[in-house]
Amino acid sequence: MPDEIPRGWRLVKLTSIAKLESGHTPSKRKPEYWNGDIPWISLHDSELLDEKEITATQKQITQLGLDNSSARLLPAGTVVFSRTATVGKATTMARSMCTSQDFANYICGKELHNHYLVYLFRFLAPEWERLMAGSTHNSIYMPVFRDLQILLPPLVEQINIASALNELDTLISNLKKLITKKRNIQQAALQQLLTGQRRLPGFSQEWEVKRLGEMAKIQRGASPRPIDSPQWFDKSSNIGWVRISDVTSSGMYLESTTQRLSPAGVAHSRPVQNGSLIMSICATVGRPVITNIDVCIHDGFVVFDNLQADKCFIYYVLKWIEPGWSKHGQTGSQMNLNTSIVNSTSIKLPPIEEQTAIAAILSDMDTELAALEARRDKARLLKQGMMQELLTGRIRLV
């Protein structure tokens, strides 16, 4: 909140302009109270609370359940705030609904725009974290909501603020849907192109079945011991040390690592040249990446040296078969593969020219997805910045 109240705004007690209602749960020992036609919002619906409004619920109660409990049917437009477990999520009801006791609900009066209140609640995430700090149940108790004060702009400005933020939410939502669609298309392309179900124009030669060990010298990494000794690390080094988290946060290419090795660390690990194909074989098994920097790998990775195939094509093959590695994994404290399993794994291999053409198509899809994800992330950052400016009155929409 700003140090000074913006001109024309007021600091008000929320319950003076909105009616606070707690949710309730009908007895679960009474089956006749459940599976009716009255929507009942519960923590099962938490993911839906990120939307502009909630239109349906996983659980419903009957009129009998409503009549024989403290549950109350709240009107469409009521603001729903999750005060337990998924604390801070908020949305509005698209129709009359009930909620469990895990929610605080506000029926907004004439001075308060409900979608403005939703955005304000989402913006106040750090405050909800602070209020939960003393709770053993990850909850915010109802007295907090009875005493809550908020900054209140004039109604027209509330509507303008909510509208501006909703436009960004719509953009983000549309980008998310497009990204999901493109990922599904890419998965279908992986299935068809990497198995030969779909052939590219100009290619008709037979494919071979080869073991990965026939196409490359597959070598496991090495780890200095004890692994957490500071003597193995040097922040100023230009030799990265690949961790599982580095790979899981990367795309096709590994551009950086969180740790770097000292000369002693390099001597006790396995150096991998820039441009090598590596794959994780421990914890998150089967995750491939191509190094764009000089690194060393520990014994949770293998490197495909002297690869006799298109590197990018094999990357996509490994990416496609990644989910299947788990059935071969040896379980101890965590899932892992050994090099003999990797060596003996067979794949379908087209001629080198077709490998390159297939990899180019899949790479173009990756590039398109990366651009869409960058647009989505930029929109999210823009929204965060706009919330900070608009909901504190630093920027006025009048």
Image (spheres, grey):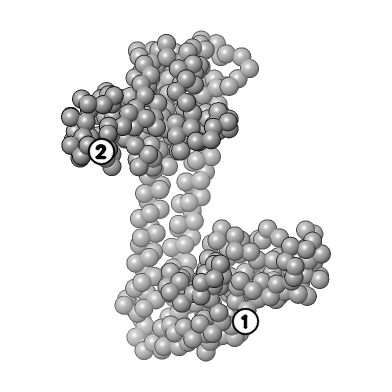
Query: Which label is found at residue 29?
Result: 2
Residue at 39% across / 32% down in the picture? 102
Decide which of 10, 173 is in the foreground and name it. Answer: 10
Residue that protrudes farthest toward the front in the picture: 29
Residue at 38% across / 65% down in the picture? 187
For the N terminus, the image quarter is: top right
Decide which of 218, 348 is in the foreground and name it. Answer: 218
**Dot 2 amino acid type:** Arg
Q: Is residue 307 visible?
A: no
Residue 132, given in percent of the width and then of the height, sits at: 54, 31
Residue at 56% across / 67% down in the picture? 333
**Does residue 242 lie above or below 133 as drawn?**
below
Q: Reading the chain from its start, which is encountered first: label 2 or label 1?
A: 2
156 left or right of 214? left
Query: Which label is found at residue 252?
Result: none
Quadrant of the rendered structure where residue 361 is?
bottom left
Residue 267, given in percent of the width and then of the height, sits at: 78, 75
**Dot 1 amino acid type:** Gln
Q: How many C-alpha atoms fall within 10 Å of the one at disc 1: few (<14), some, or many (≥20)?
A: some
Q: How many marks?
A: 2
Residue 193, given in percent of the width and then of the height, sits at: 37, 74
Secondary structure type for disc 1: strand
On the image, numbered disc 1 is attached to which residue? Answer: 219
The CA span between labels 2 and 1 is 60 Å
**Does residue 337 lie above or below 373 as drawn?**
below
